[in-house]
Amino acid sequence: MLEARQKNLRAFVISQGTEEEIIKYIEQNYILLRSFLLVFSVGLLNETIKKILCKRELNFIEENPKSPLKISNSKPMADVAVKETKEEAQEQMQTKAQENHKTKIISRTIRSGEEIISLGDLSVFGQVNSGAFLQSEGNLQIFGVSMGDILCNGDYLILSAFEGGNVIFGGEIIDREKLLDKKAKKIYKKDEKIMIEEL
């Protein structure tokens, strides 16, 4: 009997790079890339890269050369009777999302192998061990040592002490070297650029 389920996917599109650069990127970030579909532009995906992707158990596809993906940052807004700017519409959507999803607060250590996913804001008052995974669709604050893998899609991410793991913020992988000085950091986007500031 046929069974089918709908699933929403997030994707990383790899549009350029040498074989060595792509392999290095996969090896450094494969733990976080498990939650994504990797889409390779035509000509980038070879047998060596395929073997590494299979070894790391990552999901991937190659674009159709006759019909490559068209990527845009946002969908055009539908006609609205009341005139409102795009920013106002986004603020309303965020406000509704926050009303539906209260801040989740965790006051304990997140153990290795544990996976926590929050549809709203998430605050962790405890250590995040290596091998743990946190995902927040809202803002994320960690007030303990962080050694696990983190995915944040909110407006900001606060790390009080980073000692390892992988970090994806707003769909971009953050260079670990920028976080390893053990000082508290605020990560946010300004003009589509990732900003990292000490607190």
Image (spheres, rainbow, N blue to C red):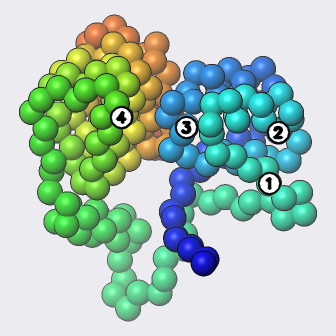
Q: Quadrant of the N terminus?
A: bottom right
**SS at mark 1?**
loop
C-alpha distance separating marks 3 and 2: 16 Å
Identity of the residue drawn at 74% across and 50% down: 61
Identity of the residue drawn at 62% across and 37% down: 57
Q: Quadrant of residue 54?
A: top right
Q: Is residue 45 visible?
A: yes
Mark 1 highlights which residue?
63
Mark 3 highlights which residue?
33
Closer to the chain start, of discs 4 and 3, is 3
Out of 104 and 4, give the one closest to the viewer: 4
Closer to the chain start, of discs 2 and 1, is 2
C-alpha distance separating marks 1 and 3: 18 Å
Q: Amino acid at mark 2?
A: Leu
Q: Quadrant of residue 199?
A: top left
Out of 15 and 35, give the one closest to the viewer: 35
Mark 4 highlights which residue?
133
Left or right: residue 7 versus residue 41 is: left
Q: Residues within 10 Å of mark 4 (few under 14, many from 20)?
A: many
C-alpha distance separating marks 1 and 4: 30 Å
Q: Amino acid at mark 4?
A: Phe
Closer to the chain start, of discs 3 and 2, is 3
Q: Looking at the picture, how far across and down is residue 85, in whole percent?
A: 38, 71
Out of 136 and 95, give the one closest to the viewer: 136
Q: Which labelled disc corresponds to residue 45?
A: 2
Out of 184 and 4, give the one closest to the viewer: 4
Q: Residues within 10 Å of mark 2 (few under 14, many from 20)?
A: some
Q: Amino acid at mark 3?
A: Leu
Left or right: residue 132 versus residue 193 is: left
